[in-house]
Image: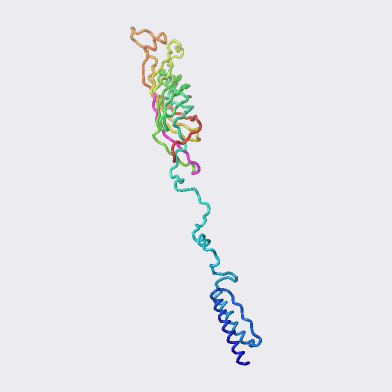
Amino acid sequence: MKRLAISLSVCLALVGFAATGHARRGGGKAAAPAADDNAGGEGGDKAAAPAAGGDQKEGGGAPAGESLDTTDQEPGKIEESLTEPKKQGPTSTLSWQDIVVVPRKAFLKGGRLELAPFAGVTVNDNLIRHYVFGADLNYYLTDALWIGLQGQYFVKQLETQEELVGLQFNRSSTLNRYLYGGAFNMGYVPSYGKFALFNRQIIHWEIWASAGVGATFTENITRDPAEQTRKGFKNTALTPNFGIGGRLFLTNWLTLNVAIRDYLIADKFEPAASTDPTMPECASPAVCKSQADTALVNNFMVYAGVGMYLPTKFTYKTPR
């Protein structure tokens, strides 16, 4: 009986060792063999201890209850999981083409009409001053070239210097006053740019040059005011003009304009008293006009105004 118990203990130990090896290879837990009451509890406990120790050493890399074996998965799903591309979140549509270093012009004038009322004053005559009120009507053939019409209405004002000349030299000044005028002009924009106003707003500007020809209607001021009816006459003077100016663009249809323009007026003035007895007396406006002295006068005008463009909106025809 004693030999039979020892044989059974050895068999049970071999079975426990085999179970422990299987648990190590599979990553799972092996069930402890049941102890035989007849074989003695000491041998059974010693056989079960290695199995528990093997679990702690080999199975610690994976959580309890989770198997590392992939044999249970279908081959098709494994390949699909390996070849399927990773899903990415929504990407931005911006690119380097949307970054504009030099922005395009904020104001286009080609094919538009400009109505530009203005007001100005003469700056080069210290005897008589004229205030001018007028308007330009321009059509822009391109963004830099235009043709247009200009009309002016003048208001005269005699200066204090004119009265002092008579008192000091005992002479009367020979003066003409401007009534109204008109001109046909052409203009060109050679320069365009922008600047920052107090680092808060970008203001676009341009400089233009213009030239044209027209007519100015004038009337002489007689030296003796009592003879204005007899000696006074009106004249239509050919008037070429040259000017430079600038614009500040405020909105899509409104600009602020400033300019200086020189009107070259071929004017006629009251003739001086003649001592030649053969000359007819200046007894009527027609006779006085035929005997008038002709002179070329530079009339420098400085004026400011606004420009209103029609249509009030424009469309860019080329991409950035």
Residue 186 falls in which quadrant of the image? Answer: top left
The reply to whether the magenta stretch includes residue 210 is: yes
Residue 288 to residue 185: above or below:
above
Q: Tell how many labels.
A: 0
Q: Position of residue 26 (x, y in %)?
A: 55, 73
Q: In which quarter of the image is the C terminus?
A: top left
Query: What residue is shown at x 47% (from left), y 38% (from top)?
Result: 106
**Residue 105 visible in the snapshot:** yes
> Would you say the magenta stretch is mainly helix, strand or loop?
strand
* 235, 87: nearer the viewer: 87
* 159, 188: nearer the viewer: 188
**Residue 170 visible in the snapshot:** no
Q: In which quarter of the image is the N terminus?
A: bottom right
Q: Position of residue 58 (x, y in %)?
A: 54, 76
Residue 38 to residue 166: above or below:
below
Q: Where is residue 308 in the image (x, y as percent from the top left)?
A: 50, 30
Residue at the farthest right position: 37
Query: What residue is shown at x 56% (from left), y 83% (from top)?
Result: 14
Query: What residue is shown at x 54% (from left), y 63% (from top)?
Result: 74
Magenta residues, start to end = 199-212
Residue 291 falls in which quadrant of the image? Answer: top left
Give the left or right position of residue 9, taking residue 274 as reference: right
* 217, 96: nearer the viewer: 96
Residue 101 to residue 38: above or below:
above
What's the coloring here? Answer: rainbow
* 187, 98: nearer the viewer: 98
The reply to whether the magenta stretch includes residue 244 is: no
